[in-house]
Amino acid sequence: MSDQNRVIIFDTTLRDAEQTPGSSLTVREKMEIAHQLARLKVDVIEAGFPASSNEDFEAVRRIAHEIEGPTICGLARVVSRDIERAGESLQGASRPRIHTFVGTSDINIQNQLRKTRDEVLKMAVGAVQQAKSYCADVEFSPMDATRTDPDYLCEVVAATIEAGATTINIPDTVGYAVPEQLGELIRYLREHVPNINQAVISIHCHDDLGLAVANSLTALKYGARQAECTINGLGERAGNAALEEIVMAIKTRGEYFGLACGVETRELFPTSRLVSRLMRCVVPRNKAVVGANAFAHSSGIHQDGVLKQRSTFEIMSPEDVGVESTQIVLTARSGRHALRHRLEQLGHTLSKEEVDKAYERFLEVADKKTEIYDEDLLAIVGDEIRDVPEKYRLDYLHTISGTGTVPSATVRLMIDGQAVQQSAWGDGPVDAAYRAIDMATGTTSKVEEYTIRAVTSGSQAMGEVTVQVSEQGRTLTGRGASTDIIEASAKAYIDALNRLAVAAGIQRQHPQAV
Ligand code: KIV
Ligand code: ZN
């Protein structure tokens, strides 16, 4: 495959997807994902928006220092201070890139920026020139490009290439584009921007109309050579184009696209599960490529066909995306070594203390449910290995519910090492437990979203709860898993409260210890 037909895979999970309310990551969690993205062999990791917070700056700085292989990119508005911060944070990177952007549609220019087209063009050129003083690799994005006047877009693109931009990204910021029209826009740029061959054309699509992947692939067909995407398609609103879908479409339909990329596809599934766990965002069962049902054949005709000849109903092999065809099942007799080994295969490299902690919980769960599948292991790791210190820990939970009874709950929490106990009633046992936790912690939070799912099939399955909680203007998501779904719900709520207290610095007054 010639270099001309190689697609650069630019992952923006740590920047665009991390902006999703409730999915914010700690620096350590970002490092874990960055290491996995390097194993996945993406070409570019957009590590964050350094000027947006000290935490983001620190995450980009550490990723730039530690991660070898991919180009490390930092985002910056066309503002001098942003570019300085991006430049500083990327100093340790072997391959740094600054990505600077400004809105170019009239809607953006008039309503948000309150400038003229000329002023915006000058700001873009100035920002690219300033970014060039930090690194040779500079990307420019005319934000809302798909709703920008095409001739003005060409003018901005030509001027920023002239100023030194080496990649021109075309963002479909609000997910407005449709495939053919976006393809034609790429063609228009290639035909009307005289210096377009001096830069790589990139595409960045959002999924508001469910077209992000189709739009990205069409742009590649029309000559774009970088695709910006996120793991599991996470991102603002309906999300970004899903990396795993773009990569597998290019690979599976190689004869149609005539393109290739360098992604190690067997790392797709482990990466998907790691991101799902750390961003506390469950992968839908029917999600293309990485969903639990993506390779499950349930109709009799399909099962029969696959058993006789896989290609009858399977266009990709599960092994190619890192899903093993034979499930490895662990039991209470499996040792620490087997657990560590399996977790490593699933993309989790844990310290000795973390393995000990996970093993203790593994034995507890194995006692209750006999056979432990990969999904159970991932739920256990998600539950036990938390990056946020446990200000609150569930010590005891007792609930009463049933037909004709008033549901009630008693909880005892360890708060900064001291026991606090409260009881409450509610609409159901989960509501009662949440009210008791509210009283014990003194939180004024509101539950915005509550989701529960069975991790595996069967009535012995572990239940996994994700709960989005807002308090004092901050929204974060917590996660908990257990074979007892009320306990899983309580753990998820406490996880969210810990994140709000520790990561977001929210202060609460709780009653005295008992
Ligand atoms: O969607 C968008 O326009 C962006 C830009 C910052 C590239 O994320
Ligand atoms: Zn975006």
Image (spheres, grey):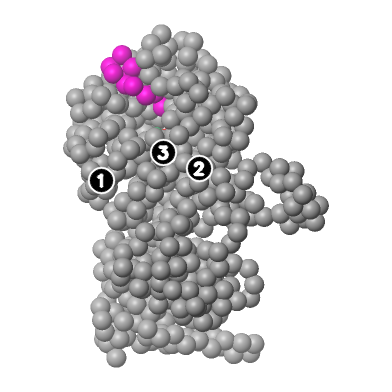
User: What residue is shown with label 2?
Assistant: 265
Residue at image location 44% in from the left, 74% down from the top = 335
Amino acid type, callout 3: Val
Residue 430 in percent (x, y) is at 51, 77
Residue 436 in which image quadrant: bottom left
Q: Which is more toward the observer, 297 or 28? A: 297
Q: Residue beneath label 1, please?
A: 66
Q: Which residue is mark 3?
A: 42
* Residue for point 35% across, 48% down: 35
Q: Residue at x 19, y 25 (%)?
A: 133
Characterize the local packing of mark 3: few (<14), some (14-19) or many (20 or more) Cα atoms within 10 angstroms.
Answer: many
Mark 1: secondary structure: helix
User: SS for tag 3?
Assistant: loop
Q: Quadrant of the C terminus?
A: bottom left
Quick check: marks 3 and 1 in contact, CB under 8 Å?
no
Cβ atoms under marks 1 and 2 closer than 8 Å: no
Residue 154 to residue 398: above or below: above
Q: CA distance from mark 3 to mark 1?
A: 16 Å
Is 398 part of what is drawn in magenta? no
- Identify residue type, mark 1: Glu
Can residue 447 be seen here? The reply is no
Instruction: Identify the image quadrant of residue 162.
Output: top left
Q: Earlier in the sequence, mark 3 or mark 1?
A: 3
In the image, is residue 97 above or below residue 277? above
- The magenta span reads 160-171
Q: Amino acid at mark 2?
A: Thr
For the residue pair 114 and 437, the one nearer the viewer reads as 437
Residue ID at (29%, 43%): 67
Instruction: Say if disc 1 is inside 8 Å of ligand 1.
Output: no
